[in-house]
Image (tube, rainbow, N blue to C red):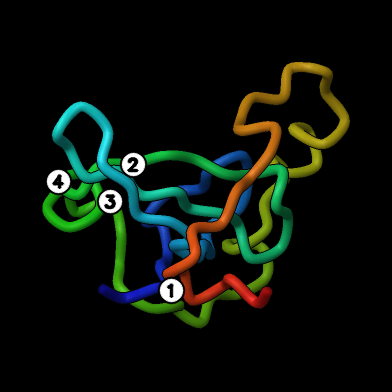
């Protein structure tokens, strides 16, 4: 599975993400994605959403700065309405597990 992804639309103002964990929840495969630039911006997504929705591109697309870091990011960082996962745990088989 590709570990580097570009969202076709911004997520809290950012578009480049890494897949850090793959888990099974209620029989479904779930992926934990974390922004390359800010670990506070993270999300869980399903296999179907990641692979078949058309919302993600495998690998990182080279984008102009204004398309990869938008004003939405500045607004997100200055707001108190931050959503996401508070703590990120890396599975032992994750590419990002360095212990």
Mark 3: few/some/many CA within 10 Å (<14, 14-19, 20+):
few
Residue 63, quarter of the rendered image = bottom right
**Which label was assigned to residue 48?**
4
Residue depth check, mark 2 versus mark 3: number of the one nearer the observer: 2
Residue furthest out toward the top:
81
**Residue under pointer 2:** 45
Q: Are marks 2 and 1 in contact (CB under 8 Å)?
A: no
Sequence-wise first label, 4 or 1: 1
SS category of the residue bearing label 3? loop
Task: In this rendered view, identify the residue nearer to me: 50 or 31.
Answer: 31
Q: Position of residue 89 (x, y in %)?
A: 60, 48
- 69 sits to left or right of 56: right
**Residue under pointer 1:** 4
Residue depth check, mark 3 versus mark 4: number of the one nearer the observer: 4
Task: In this rendered view, identify the residue nearer to me: 69 or 18.
Answer: 18
Task: Measure how far apart labels 2 and 3 are at the Cα level.
Answer: 11 Å
**Residue under pointer 3:** 55
Image quarter (top left, top right, bottom left or bottom right) of the N terminus: bottom left
Q: Position of residue 37 (x, y in %)?
A: 71, 63
**40 to 84, vertically: above or below:** below
Task: Measure how far apart labels 3 and 4 are at the Cα level.
Answer: 10 Å
Q: Position of residue 85 (x, y in %)?
A: 61, 33
């Amino acid at each position: 599975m590709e570990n580097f992804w570009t969202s076709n639309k911004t997520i809290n103002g950012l578009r480049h993400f890494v897949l850090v964990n793959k888990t099974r929840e209620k029989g479904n495969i779930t992926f934990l994605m974390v922004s390359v630039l800010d670990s506070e911006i993270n999300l869980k997504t399903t296999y179907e959403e990641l692979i078949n929705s058309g919302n993600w591109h495998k690998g990182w697309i080279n984008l102009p700065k204004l398309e990869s870091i938008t004003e939405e990011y500045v607004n997100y960082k200055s707001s108190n309405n931050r959503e996401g996962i508070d703590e990120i745990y890396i599975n032992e088989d994750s590419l990002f597990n360095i212990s």
